[in-house]
Amino acid sequence: MQILYSAHWLIPWCSGAVGLYALVKLVRGYINENAFTDTHSRLVRIYSGLMDLQATTGLIYFLWRGVQVDGFPMYRFLHGLTMFVATLIPHFSARWNNADDSTRYITNFYLLLSSFLLTLLGLSFIP
């Protein structure tokens, strides 16, 4: 249980670092009108994968702790629901795979930004 708890609190630091780096790269690419490269797509996919891993550990922790220890308090439910939505948002970037570079930069930026902000909102539910 302690390993799961530690993993659930370590992965957000990794996803936060990757997310902030990706946001900066996307803004710089949009402003400089660079070509949208595979590196940019890879950053979005890495962030999305880390969010998926975080959601998986969180769901297991939610169920394990809820059944074994203290039930399902409302703040955990709200945290989980918000974080689930924050996990889904980066996956929508695949809808713009065939768009022009400028559109891909700006849509991926807004998707990652909204996921990042929802993650902060989800963290605020934890007492």
Image (tube, grey):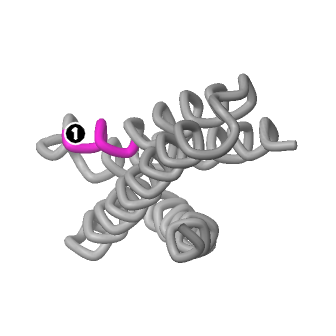
Q: Residue 8: image x %, image y %? A: 56, 64
Q: Is residue 6 above or below residue 104?
A: below
Residue 36 in the figure: left or right of residue 125: left
Residue occupied by mark 1? 96
User: 41 and 12: which one is in front?
Assistant: 12
- Magenta range is 90-94
Q: Toward which corner of the image does residue 126 lie, by quadrant?
A: top right
Which residue occupies 48% across, 67% down?
Answer: 22
Q: Which three-letter amino acid code belongs to the residue tagged 1?
A: Trp
User: 110 and 74: which one is in front?
Assistant: 74
Would you say residue 34 is visible in this rendering? no
User: Where does the C terminus fall, quadrant-wise?
Assistant: top right
Residue 35 in the figure: left or right of residue 83: left
What count of labels does the image hold? 1
Q: Residue furthest left?
A: 98
Q: Is residue 92 above or below residue 14?
A: above
**Mark 1 residue crowding within 10 angstroms, few (<14) / some (14–19) / many (20+):** some
